[in-house]
Structure formats: C-alpha cells, structure tokens
Amino acid sequence: MGQTVLQLDQLTRSVRGASEAREERLTALLNAAAEIDPDTAARKTSDTKQRPYLAAEVEGPLLGAYPPPEPPADWVVAAVDGSHIDVDRHLPVACYLLNFGGCVLTYGSQPDATLFSHPHLATTPEELYISDPKNSAGEEMISGPLLGLVRTVKELETLANTVEQCPPGLPVLALVDGSLVLWALSGQAFRPYVSDAVIKDGLLPAMKRLETLAESRPVALAAYVSFPRSTEAVNAVRCSLCPHDLTVCAQSCNNRRSTQQPCNGANDFLDRDLFQRLLEPGWRSPVYKTNSSVSRDSYDEANKVHFFYVNAGQEIGRVEIPRWVAKNESLLSLAHGLVWDQCQRGQGYPVAISESHEQAVINAGDRRVFRRLLTDSLERQGLSAATSQKDRAKRSPWV
C-alpha cells in the first residue's frame, strides 16, 4: 500500500492540474450547444445507429432546465429493490436465492408506511434454466449476469404486485433502483431465446401491468440511477455539432473521444457534468430517448426507455421512464416532482429506495449463514455436503 499511496498522490496532482482547463472546455461546449436549434438536434440524433458512439435521441430542446412541480396533497411511493445469492459451483447442489425488499410510503392527510421482504429459493429445473422452446436440447443456466437480469425482471414484477395493493385513489410513484434498460443483453452473447424469455416473457409484461394500472389512477414508473456515468446527452451534443460524414466519424470517434473538431470539445465529459452546470436543485433536464439497441430493438413502442436528469441536491441523478410516462405531461410531472421530494427526504437520494435496499440486502454474514444452513440441511438428510478442494483451501489458508 505504501507504493500505491505514491501513485495515488501522482494521480490526484494530475487531476488538479487539469481541472481549470476542463472547466473552460465545458463552458465552450455549453455555449456551442446553446447555438443548436431543436430541429437540427432532432434530425441529427434521429438515427445514430451508424455512429461509433451511443447518442440519445432528442425530441425537444437539446439542453434546458425545468423547475420541479409541487407534489399532490396525498400520494404514495412504492419501491422495490433486490439482492441475490448466486449459484455456487463449489457446492453439491445447484440453487440460488432471490430476496426482494420494498416499501409503500403514503404521504399527506393519512400517512402510513409498510415494509416487506420476500425471499425465494430457486431449486427446480424450470427456475434454474431457460429452455429453448424450439429445441429441447437448448438451455441456459440462470447464473452470473443472466441471474442479474432475471432478478431485475422479478423486481418489476414485485413492484407491479405492490402497486396493485397500494391505497386506492392516490397517485403512485412506482420506483426501482438502477436502469430500465437491460444493458447486459447488449454486451453478452445470449442466444435469442434467452433474450426473448427475459424481455418478451418477463420485463415487458411487468411494465405493461403498470401501464394498465395507470389507466385507472395516476401511476408513474421510474428508475433512479445515482451518480450516473452515462454520456448519451453529451454524445447528442457531439452528434448535433458534427459537420462530418459517417466515414470520417467511424475513423475518428469512439464512445468517449473524437480526434476531429468541433466534436472533440465533448471529449471526456459525462452527462452529469453538463447538468451540474445547468440545473438548480430540484430542476430537471429535457427528456431524451435512449438509443440503446436493447430498448430500441426489443421493447414495444409504449415501453421504449426515455430519461431525464435531475439535480437531487447532492448529485445529478438519472431518472429513466417508459414512453407512456414520458409522453403524458401529468405523469412526467408526477415522476419529476415526487422523485425530487424523495431525494429531499433522503438527503439527496430517494428515501423509498434506501428503505427497500435495507429490506433486500443480503450481507456477508447472511451469505455465510445461508451456506451453513444449506450444508446442515444436506447432512440431516444423510447427503454429502462436500465442497471443492479449491473452496476448502480459500476458507482454510495455510499461512
């Protein structure tokens, strides 16, 4: 660690030296973006599939700021979070544990709070594998990144169940932690039947249930991303400024940098850098449409993912919403106003998500207890609880 400290000091000195020049570059980028008219931005970002970077689709102003609306007199926030224990190949049986925690917080004239935690142990072949409906030999074990995707789907299913039980007649903010875009599907080589099972058979039906609930009462589905590292809005600015054809773009740009002017004015900036300058506490950015291939190609039109940024007081947060919320002014206002209210109550982070996380989290001690309970149960049944020698060596080091 002594050697690492020296390297860390060198890093922080270099960051400090570059900060002033970075602020000047950011000012120049914002000034250039202010000169772009909305029609140009909408035209240039309408189809960015051929560009070597992910740029948001602009359907209104390229940049801007909108004040927070007042929350209704009485309202509800329902939030769900999840945690899991993955399949352990060093154990003699295959299983995984999902735990979903959540809360229903009612505000106004009749305040109330309900917390819950629902664990589920998956042990059957139907829960452990996704099978190809067209080929009996095709199957994919649910573990690792795929288990993370399945958990996200189950979180939304649990959220829909929770909203159905909310006090009738009150507006509801249905809130989850993280993203509505299943980004892992774009980076993993999952076979088509796996993606179909996750999205078409899982995610979209859950989102459509919430959309149906919104037909009888105000329900706004939103996902909150804390301290986002996205560059979709920055790349929308870069795309709108770009005077070059696609061949030059393909040779000169990647998702983070460009070697061409004026596009290189956006180099190394994140979306939150833009909106840290533009947004007062509680204010939000314009609404953008993500051009992620997962949302663009696999989600139905009503549930294609849109997003905006909000100054949560302590950070710039990213709020993702389906199109049926983005295109409904009252639901969009509800999502904006209630997310901001939640952030104020939670000291810069939605309090309902914090409470849901506390109900859902499986800590290191829980994991050790789970493992011991599993081995004890096997031994009580007269079955072997033997583990691998590699696992034994890690748990009982020689030195």
Image (spheres, rainbow, N blue to C red):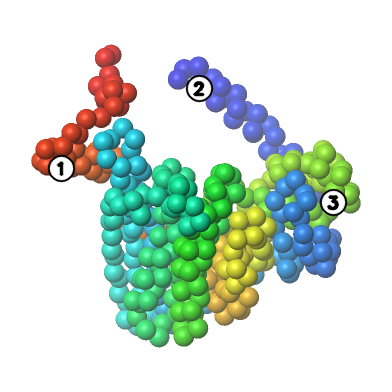
Q: Is residue 244 at all visible to an observer of this figure?
A: yes
- CA separation in Å, label 1 and label 3: 63 Å
Give residue 16's position: percent from left, percent from top: 64, 33
Q: Quadrant of residue 18?
A: top right
* Labels 2 and 3 touching (C-beta < 8 A): no
Q: How many marks?
A: 3
Q: Which mark is residue 377?
A: 1
Q: Secondary structure at mark 3?
A: loop
**First of labels 2, 1 by sequence position:** 2
> How many residues crowd mark 1 within 10 Å: few (<14), some (14–19), many (20+)?
few
Nearer to us in this view, 95 or 227: 95
Quarter occupied by the N terminus: top left
| Residue sitting at x 33%, y 38% | 88
Tell me the residue that label 2 is attached to. 5
Quarter occupied by the C terminus: top left
Residue 304 is left or right of residue 102, and the answer is right
- Classify 80 as above or below 254: below
Residue 49 is left or right of residue 132, and the answer is right
> How many residues crowd mark 3 within 10 Å: few (<14), some (14–19), many (20+)?
some
**First of labels 2, 3 by sequence position:** 2
Residue 313 is left or right of residue 90, and the answer is right
Q: Is residue 65 at all visible to an observer of this figure?
A: no
* Labels 1 and 3 touching (C-beta < 8 A): no
